[in-house]
Image (cartoon, rainbow, N blue to C red):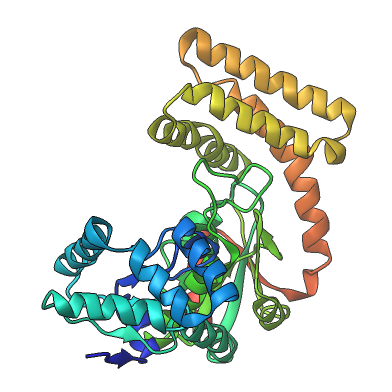
Amino acid sequence: MSELFDDFKSIVLNERPLIDVRAPIEFKKGAFLNSFNLPIMSDEERHQVGICYKNRGNAKAIELGHELVSGDIKEQRVKSWCDFMDANPDALLYCFRGGQRSKIAQEWLHEQGREILRLKGGYKAFRGYLLGELENTLKEFKPIILGGRTGSGKTIELKKMKNAVDIEALANHRGSAFGQKITPQASQIDFENNFTYKLIQKVEEGFGTLVFEDEGKHVGTLFMPDSFITATSEAPLVILERPFDERVEITLNEYVVEAQRAYERNTPYDAFASWQQSIESAMHRIKRRLGDQRYREVSTLFKNAVEEQKRNGSFELYRDWTTYLLQEYYDPMYDYQIQKRSDRVTFRGTAAKVKEYIEEFS
């Protein structure tokens, strides 16, 4: 009855749903793609059992756990697992080390006539597998880095490529000073796990070359694994070029139009004010790099655009603000950074030409 499952690669390739019975506080620190937290114990219950374990030993701790999770509480938690299994017949079960909590959950389900496999070694073993596979998978493909100025549409083009990994999507961040989204970023552990999932899946699909956007070491609050930075440090750099007026439109759409829509979908209070505050906070973060005068100028342009939108719903003045940001902040910074890596640039061109080049390279 206490059957175990340890084919971790099949979990990745099939994106199998997982029941995580750890406490919520553990789940928030890190979990896996398609894992759902249906804890056997709440944070407080786990805390009490932990104290009991330290003071009175394992047997008394287990006894206390059964006392805390009994009756209606136990019934509700078992029902939540059964409901999940009904919706996901191929679900697997895990706790931290694949020990007592997942085994007890498995036994309780068995009492209800339900059978489920649990991960051998639990979270710790699967996490260890992914960390090892990150190192191994990085040796299985040749990387290409897609660069280009802000607004050149790198992410747009990346999404069209089957052999690309969209790091910004995994990180839930646009990778710039104004890249923060309304929904929070994943934990560092979640990001690493999901990133490794993607690499394993792409290599399994047979891609010998993978394309990544030029992100640097950090994407918002998250950082790229050191092994990935090392593996891509000498990778060919392909530069996507786009006319300046198109870059303005792409940036305007991303920073203003689509961002406001996202706030409207996800903010229960004043969505526009929240979006405005997020942009003002981003401008303040780059104040030192801009200098006082340019900071005042870009702030004034943004203020004028906001007032114009409030008056007649027009986005027109945001073009002045976006143009200023590109010319005075993003482009000089990009030129400086790309100059330091000019020896790695193997191609420059339009979206169509870049696509053609990468296909030939691959």
Residue 33 seen in this snapshot: no
Residue drawn at point x = 86 percent, y = 38 percent:
288
Residue farthest to the left, as pictured: 113
In this picture, residue 127 sits left or right of residue 15? right
Q: Quadrant of residue 317?
A: top right
Percent across and percent down for residue 17 are 29, 71
Left/right of residue 323 with respect to residue 42 in the rendered view: right
Q: Position of residue 263 (x, y in %)?
A: 46, 33
Residue at image position (56%, 12%) is 308
* Residue 293 location, quadrant: top right
Q: Position of residue 299 (x, y in %)?
A: 74, 23
Question: Relative to 161, does residue 127 appear above or below in the rendering?
Answer: below
Residue 157 percent location from the top left of the image: 48, 59
Work out whether residue 241 or residue 189 is closer to the camera in this orientation and state it: 189
Give whichever of 200, 202 is nearer the camera.
200
Q: Is residue 150 visible?
A: yes
* In-image side of 312 versus 241 (left or right): left
In the figure, 64 relative to 8: above or below? Answer: above
The front one of 317 and 20 is: 20
